[in-house]
């Protein structure tokens, strides 16, 4: 049985995601209204000192951007960014005072989370498709295109950097 095309009309939009100085963003997808509260609890239980805001695009019912967080500026930014993306069941989390690595595995284990598109402080763009039915997040452009392959000097720099910031043993 082949796929049936409901409409050949669609539009693809690239949306620049704002990343304030000193902030990281996680963009993912989920499937249920309780996502906002479950992710909130997951973040504060994983890293209680982290500041964050969370937005979630509800895909049915009231179809609102639901939002939570413990930092009003980041909460507002997450809600506004979700509204700009406007794709069903997408969530955006802005973090400050911590890193995605501190909370990412716990977020992945939230039962309703279906995928993570990115966790970054790099410039990031959302690639959104719009059809007659609505909008979907196809993926993200995270950072920039590579310019080459690391040499021995860059390998050494990378390894030293990870030890300097405490992510690897001396």
Image: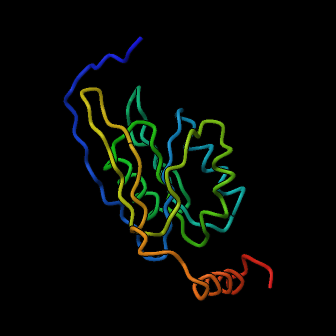
Give the total of numbered labels. Answer: 0
Q: Residue 20, image x and y in percent?
A: 41, 71
Answer with left or right where residue 43 lies relative to residue 57. right
Dividing the image into 4 quarters, which one contains the N terminus?
Answer: top left
* Residue farthest toward the right in the current orientation of the protein: 169
Task: Identify the residue at image location x=38%, y=43%.
Answer: 138
Q: Nearer the viewer, residue 10 or 81?
A: 10
Q: Is residue 92 above or below residue 86?
A: below
Relative image position of residue 91 (x, y in whole percent): 47, 47
Q: Residue at x 36, y 53 (%)?
A: 126
Query: Is residue 11 shown left or right of residue 62?
Result: left
Q: Quick one: which residue is furthest to the left in this view?
A: 9
Residue drawn 59% across the image and 73% down it: 97
The location of residue 158, given as percent across then percent down, is 62, 81
Picture residue at 60% right of the left edge, 63% below the top? 100
Residue 162 at x, y percent in the picture: 67, 80
């Amino acid at each position: 049985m082949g796929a049936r095309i409901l409409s050949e009309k669609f539009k693809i939009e690239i949306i620049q995601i704002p990343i304030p100085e000193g902030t990281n963003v996680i963009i993912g997808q989920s499937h249920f209204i309780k996502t906002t509260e479950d992710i909130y609890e997951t973040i504060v239980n994983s890293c209680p000192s982290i500041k964050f805001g969370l937005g979630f695009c509800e895909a049915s019912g009231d179809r609102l951007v639901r939002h939570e967080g413990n930092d009003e500026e980041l909460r507002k930014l997450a809600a506004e960014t979700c509204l700009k993306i406007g794709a069903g069941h997408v969530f955006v989390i802005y973090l400050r005072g911590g890193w995605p690595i501190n909370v990412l595995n716990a977020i992945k284990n939230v039962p309703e989370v279906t995928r993570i598109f990115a966790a970054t402080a790099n410039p990031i763009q959302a690639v959104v498709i719009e059809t007659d039915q609505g909008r979907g997040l196809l993926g993200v452009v995270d950072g920039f295109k590579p310019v080459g392959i690391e040499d021995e000097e860059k390998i050494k720099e990378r390894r030293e950097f990870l030890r300097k910031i405490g992510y690897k043993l001396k």
